[in-house]
Amino acid sequence: MCGIVGYVGKQKAASIILEGLKRLEYRGYDSAGLCILQGGQLDVAKKAGRVEVLVKEAARHRFNGTTGIGHTRWATHGGVTDANAHPHISSDGKFALIHNGVIENYAQMKTFLAGKGYTFKSETDTEVLCNLIAYHYAKEPSDSNGTSRFLESVRKALEHVEGTYGIAVLCVDFPGEMVAAREASPLLLGVGDGEYIVASDASALINRTQNVVYLKDGELVYVTAAGFTITTLGQADVSPVVDRITWSIADAERGSHAHFMEKEIFEQPVALENTMRGRFSEDGSTANFGGLNLSAPELRQIDRFMFCACGSAWHACLVAEHLIERYARLPVEVDYASEFRYRNSPLDRNTLFFVMSQSGETIDTLAALREAKRKGYRVLAINNVVGSSIAREADGGVYQHVGPEIGVASTKAFTSQLLLGAMLALYIARLRDMSFNDGVQYVNALKGAPDLVRQALGQAAHIQAIAKRYARYADFLFLGRLSLFPIALEGALKLKEISYIHAEGYPAAEMKHGPIALISEKCPSVFFVPKGEIFNKIVSSMQEIKARKGKIIAIVTEGCELPAGLADEVIPIPDCHEAVLPIVATVPVQLLSYYIAVVLKCDVDKPRNLAKSVTVE
Ligand code: F6R
């Protein structure tokens, strides 16, 4: 949430920052702004609205400077106004600040600073921090102990901050220099050819460099023309580790697709191949998960799993629960990370704790990880973004390897999480009771998932036509059972978040205990109808809806015969192994939501009120 970019180098900073902000816009799009340090002044352009509005505003300025900062905002403190847009300038005109996070004790600081004569133009916590830096700067003697007065003022101000931040700061007295710092909000430094770029994530700088330093909590980076140094809030020196980003600029671009969401839905077969690559044993009977950092004997000691996540990742955990319990015969608990962190959930020594997060920066999931670690548990992570906070703080884990996911609604990261959950179930099951032959069959089924997803994507035109007929309905139910109940939840979430249509996901048979009251010809139901033991039960639930004039869109595995006239629309999906079914069944609901949102002319990649990577509580 909120994207920040800062540039120090030899090129004109404004265009590089604006380019970075366009790539970071999925993190927040309430307002955008930039500040260039030039001619001994901090020149600011900022506007409520999208980055494209800022681009027009910036064109009215003569931005020539080679040092600058920019921000795209997801509003927390204060409404969506020009004044609340970042960067903020201290009331003495000396500092410019951009911030991602929340300063919890800003009200006390504001009162204190107002008493010292500092004034405020916005309602934000960020402007308070900016003035606090100015206050410490005014108190500091000139550069003391060989350290920069600029750096020390930022450090002193941060010592008083309670909350979370990724910040970048400019000081009018230090042209060509920048200080950036982080605490629980992502920040990395791109090390380019004679230039440095700080950013909330790598997509903002991938067009200029693939060499990055991931900053850790409590670290500050001081960037000058001569290079950069990293220290901690406690003034310890840090030796930087420069990592190389493995994906490229093309992965972060939309290409010929109308939306990132469309691109990412259609990338799923390749994404799944990348998630699986090199992760099956040579004998083809199990998965390889070296990154868990647990030996087979240690894993055999595990007698319970706990998963924590948010949103779509939480749905993926529910599917993992189903498969681990079914195949590995071990109890699994799944909790919302935001609930777990405030509950006192009993865990025992033999519980293996997992967090699942595409971004690896979701603050609730990160906090759940920290709480579990504080209690002494080994915490493993399923995560997509290499070098993310969750990846670094977990004791081990598995990367998803699906490349950057830019569309705010998760698609390819979700199906990859489903796949890793299925692989984990296999891995644990093979350490316990699953036979070699069953393992081989399971592995072959997983290897076939990309092709089955390709087949499911082949229904796109059919689903698009259905979307046109159903886009004007105001309420939907999504109904599924067993491993497809979480996919019903996911279908409802997708529809809600990108088309703003009210939708609920429910276990199909549970529907008659309440939600059936919603059913009329005005509320269609999307049913998942897989082959197998529950087929007849699901057909009965469909009959109950039909008897109440509810329209039915049925996602049906090939080979199943529905009673004539029961479904108004049928979307076939290929028949497949139970471990693969949730992945394949997800595709039609992604496409249905996507096409409905397109019909309704919604901003698919930037749905209202949402942002990718929720780094605030
Ligand atoms: C829904 C969606 C969100 C995320 C959730 C967790 O389409 O994208 O519900 O799944 O915010 O995000 P991560 O996986 O980054 O922790």
Image (cartoon, rainbow, N blue to C red):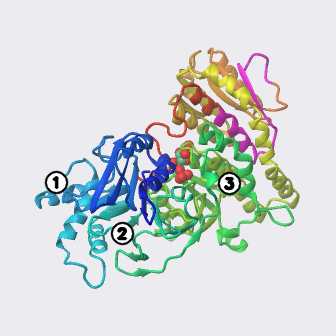
The residue pinned by badge 3 equals 421
Against 191, residue 61 (above or below) is: above
The residue pinned by badge 2 equals 177
Q: Is residue 29 magenta?
A: no
Viewer-nearest residue: 408 or 518? 408
Residue 529 place in picture, x, y as percent: 73, 32
Say left or right for 7 vs 354. Answer: left
Say left or right for 226 vs 449. Answer: left
Q: Is mark 2 within 8 Å of ligand 1?
A: no
The residue pinned by badge 1 equals 119
Which of discs 1 and 2 lies nearer the camera? The answer is: 2
- How crowded pointer 3 is (Cα within 10 Å; few <14, some 14-19, many 20+) is rated as many
Q: Earlier in the sequence, mark 2 or mark 3?
A: 2
Secondary structure beneath dot 2 equals: loop
Q: Is residue 517 visible?
A: yes
- How crowded pointer 1 is (Cα within 10 Å; few <14, some 14-19, many 20+) is rated as some
Say left or right for 50 vs 134. Answer: right
Please name the residue shown 65% across and 68% down the image: 292
Q: Amino acid at mark 2?
A: Glu
Q: CA distance from mark 2 to mark 3?
A: 46 Å
Q: Amino acid at mark 1?
A: Thr
Q: Is mark 1 within 8 Å of ligand 1?
A: no
The total of numbered circles placed on residues is 3
Q: Is residue 571 magenta?
A: yes
Circles 1 and 3: CB distance less than 8 Å?
A: no
- How crowded pointer 2 is (Cα within 10 Å; few <14, some 14-19, many 20+) is rated as many
What is the magenta range?
Answer: 562-591
Quadrant in the rendering for residue 65 = bottom left
Secondary structure beneath dot 1 equals: loop
Q: Earlier in the sequence, mark 1 or mark 3?
A: 1
